[in-house]
Image: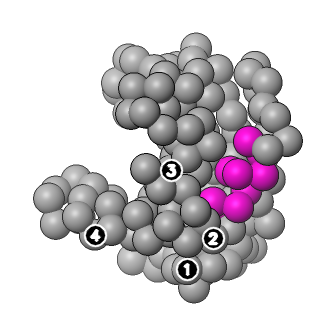
Amino acid sequence: MIEVYAEDEALTAEEEQCIRTACETALSMESAAGDITVLVAGPDHIRQLNRDFRNVDRVTDVLTFPSREGEDLPGSPDGYLGDIMICRSRAVEQAEEYGHSLSRELAFLAVHGTLHILGYDHMNEAEEQIMRARQRTILERIGETR
């Protein structure tokens, strides 16, 4: 189950469904199952968490908190995979900057976060290429292309 909550920023029903569909599709295409909570947070909250957990004192677009990390991904005995935080105002800025829709940007961030929860990363060029390819394939499946 994918739960989507909005904190400070308004979230339309369409945006909420876009995020839910992106997460569900990513899980399905990765043959994974489990629960994810997505919190659409304001810039102050996401900046604080980015600072506290990553030692990066700036607003970011998405943060991911897997329930488990390590070789035994993707799974958890209780089925809970983790949390994703998306900054809607940052997504709005990026959609405008990249010249695509807000729904495409929200879907991208939700897919990106879901893949992180499932153990994907982009710490080096090889990992980044693999993750980008998976993101592109999933976004194409749900019709959110550039």
Q: Which residues are magenta?
A: 15-23
Residue at the disc numbered 4 = 130
Q: Tell me the kind of residue under disc 3.
A: Phe
Residue 134 pos. (x, y %): 39, 70
Mark earlier in primary sequence (2, 4): 2
Q: Is residue 51 left or right of residue 26?
A: left
Q: Residue furthest left?
A: 125
The local secondary structure at tag 1 comes to helix
Badge 2 amino acid: Thr
The residue labelled by disc 3 is 108
Q: Quadrant of residue 125?
A: bottom left
- The colour scheme is one colour
Q: In the rendered structure, which amino acid carries the disc numbered 1?
A: Met
Closer to us: 116 or 133: 133
Do we see residue 52 in this rendering? Answer: no
Are the residues tagged 2 and 3 within 8 Å (C-beta)?
Answer: no
Of residues 139 and 70, the one nearer the viewer is 139
Q: CA distance from mark 1 to mark 2?
A: 6 Å
Would residue 34 be found to the left or right of residue 93 on screen? right
Q: CA distance from mark 2 to mark 3?
A: 12 Å
**Mark 2 highlights which residue?**
25
125 relative to 93, above or below: below
The residue at which mark 1 appears reads as 29
